[in-house]
Amino acid sequence: MYLKAGRAFDMVIIDPPSFAKKQADVKNALSAYARLVKMGLNVLNPGGTFIMASCSSRISPEMFFSTVGRAASEAGRRLNEIEKTAHALDHPVKFEEGRYLKCLFSVLQ
């Protein structure tokens, strides 16, 4: 879906499918997340809520959150973090790759 020029929103939620199904996909996955962040921020009103999620098991939370922050910075946009989330308590993680759910809630300054 393509947006009409000049259209903006008060909330943007980006929750793509897993981009890194194997280790060789990690570099391209991080690039894809960065592109999505920039596109999403491009249509978000100042003060709007930005939600970015990932379910790629080969992308660590640290890699994901730093990619989102770097992409926002490269886009000249500043995000004020509200919360970072992961698995709920009823979904215990017993191995590193099990930490596949991650989500950032933020507000565009």
Image: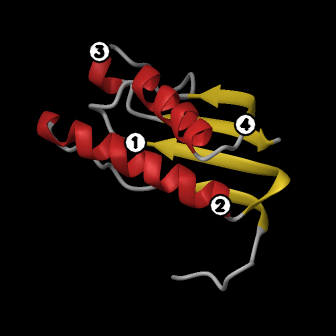
* Residue 38 percent across, percent down from the top left: 55, 53
| Up/down of 99 relative to 101, above or below | above
Cα–Cα span, label 1 and label 2: 23 Å
Cα–Cα span, label 4 and label 1: 21 Å
Is residue 49 toward the left or the right of residue 103 in the image? right
4 and 1 marks in contact (CB < 8 Å) = no
Tag 4: Cα neighbours inside 10 Å, few (<14), some, or many (≥20)? many
Quarter in which the C terminus is drawn: top right
| Up/down of 60 relative to 7, above or below | above
* Residue 95 percent across, percent down from the top left: 29, 15
Residue of label 1: 55
* Residue 32 percent across, percent down from the top left: 37, 51
1 and 2 marks in contact (CB < 8 Å) = no
Of labels 2 and 4, earlier in sequence is: 2
Residue of label 4: 79
Cα–Cα span, label 3 and label 1: 15 Å
Disc 4 or disc 1, which is closer to the eye? 4
Disc 3 or disc 1, which is closer to the eye? 1
